[in-house]
Image: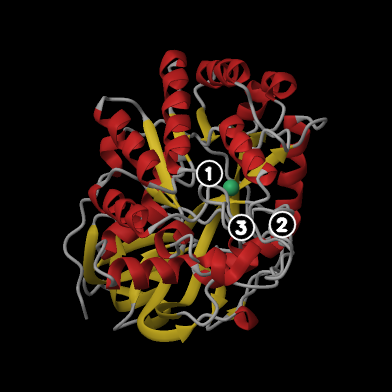
Amino acid sequence: MANVDRLFRGGTVVTGEGYRRGDVAVSDGRVVAVGKDLDVQAREVQDVGGAYVFPGLIDAHTHPVYLDDLGGLSVTAAHGGVTTVLHFAYAKPGQGLVATIEAFMEQGREGSVLDFALHGGLFDPARQSEEIPRAVELGVTSFKMFMTYAKLKWMTDDYQLMRTLDIIASVGGLGMVHAENGLATDYLEDKSAALGRDPAEDFLTTRPGILEGEAVNRAAAMAAVAGCPLYIPHVSGREAAEAVSRLRAAGQWVYGETCPQYLTLTGEEIARQGPLAKIGPPLRGEDDQRVLWQALAHGDLDVVASDHAPKAKRRDDPFFEAPYGSPQVETMPTLLFDRGVLGGWITLPRMVQLLSENPAKIFGLYPAKGTLREGSDADLVIWDPHSERTITHATQHSHAPYTLYEGTRVAGRPVGVMQRGAWVVWEDELQARAGQGSFLPTRAGTVALGALKPKGGACPQE
Ligand SMILES: [Zn+2]
C-alpha cells in the first residue's frame, strides 16, 4: 500500500477519453494514480462521490491588458475552473516583441495565481517579425496578427502576413490570425456612417460572416505556401467554420477555436445591451450558433476559449466609440457545461477535450496539462453538476463593470480548483497567493488534427 498526499475518492473522473467512476491519488504536485478503489494510504482523503473530476481547464485566449491584469485575470479564471491561461502578449507599434514577452513573463511571475503561457501578438510585423526566433527560444511559439482593424492601424497587410508566416514556419511555430477582411469591413462601416445610419443597427451587416470566411481562406492559402500550421481564434459564424472544415478536409493543418459568447448569444444582444455586446468578430445569428455547436461536436473545431477582454463600457455609451470585447473567462466553463453538455450539443468528455485536452495538445503542454493520468500535473477541478446558480456581475471576480450573462441561470459549478496539488479556489474562496503560478514554455502547432477529434462516450444525463 503506497503512501500519497491526497486521495479523491469515488468521483466520476472525466477526461477527453471518456469518463468512469474512480479515485485520483496526488503526491508532490503530480497525479500518481487514477483508478477504481485505489489501494493507497493518504494523508488526506476526500470523498467526491456525486461530483465530476476534470483535469484543470485551460483558457487558450485571454487579454490581460485591459481591466484585469495578469494577476487579476488569473483570479477570475480560477474561480471559473480554469488552471492554465494562455495570454496574448500584445506588442503594440513601437514596442519590441521580445521586450513585451519579457514584461508579461515578469508580471505573471509576480502576480499570477495560475500557470500561464504566452502567445506573441504582432501589431507591426514589419518591425517585429525578426524577433520571432528569439521569442521561440524564450518559450513563446504561437504568434497572432490582425487581418482586421485597418482604421485602428492594427491590420497586417498580405505582404507582411506572408512574410511573417514564412518566418514562423522557419522556426517551427504556429501562426494565428484574427480573420476578418479589415479593409472591406472598414468600407462598409464608412458607407453606413456616410448614410447617417445607426452604427449599432448596422454592426452585423458591416462585418458579415462571409468576410470572416474570406480572411480564413486567405490566411490559410498563405500558410499553405509557407508550410506553417495555422490557428484561427474566435471563429464566430458559418462561413469561417465551413472554411476551416473544408481546409482540414483537404489536409491542411488549420486549428479552429470558438468562444462561449458565439455559442450562447446572438447579435440581438446589441439591441438589449448596446456597446456591452460589441465584440469583434460580432455576435451573429442562431444559424451560426448551430453551425458552431455542430462543428465542436463533430470535430471540425478543436477548442473553446474565452477571448476575455474586460473593458470599461456602459450600456448607454455611444456605440461607435465603444471598444470591442467582453469579460468571459469565469463564466465559460459553466456556460459550456450548461448549454453544451446539458443542452445536448456535446458530450461531457468532448467538453473536457475542448476546454483542456485539445488546447494542451495544440500548445504542447500535454500530458502534463490536459488530462488526469499518472505523471500529469495535479491540476484538477471538482465539479458539482447539480449546483445551479444565477450569473450576476456582483459575484464575478473580473474588474469589468458588467457581465453579458446577467440573470442567466446555469447548472454546474467548480467546487474546488487545484493546481500542482494545492487548492487555488475552494468553495469560492481564493486559496492561492499571487506569484504562485509558473510560466510554461509552449511548443505549439505540432499535434496532428486526428488527435483532437471527439472520442468520448455518451454523456450521463444524471
Ligand atoms: Zn482576442
Residue 336 at x, y percent in the picture: 39, 65
Determine if the C-beta at disc 2 is less than 8 A from ligand 1: no
Along the horizontal axis of the image, is 221 left or right of 146?
A: left
Looking at the rendered structure, the kind of residue marked 1 is Arg
Residue 140 at x, y percent in the picture: 60, 35
Looking at the rendered structure, the kind of residue marked 3 is Ala
On the question of residue 339 being in view, the answer is yes
Give the CA separation, mark 2 to mark 1. 16 Å
What's the residue at 39%, 39% (across, down)?
A: 240
Disc on res. 92? none
> Label 1: few (<14), some or many (≥20) within 10 Å?
many
Residue 253 at x, y percent in the picture: 36, 28
Disc on res. 207? 1
Along the horizontal axis of the image, is 85 left or right of 300?
A: right
Residue 242's place in the image compared with 308, above or below, is above
Disc on res. 322? 2
Give the CA separation, mark 2 to mark 3. 10 Å
Q: Nearer the viewer, residue 369 or 82?
A: 82
Name the residue carrying label 3: 200
Q: Secondary structure at mark 3?
A: loop
Q: Where is residue 161, by image quadrant?
A: top right
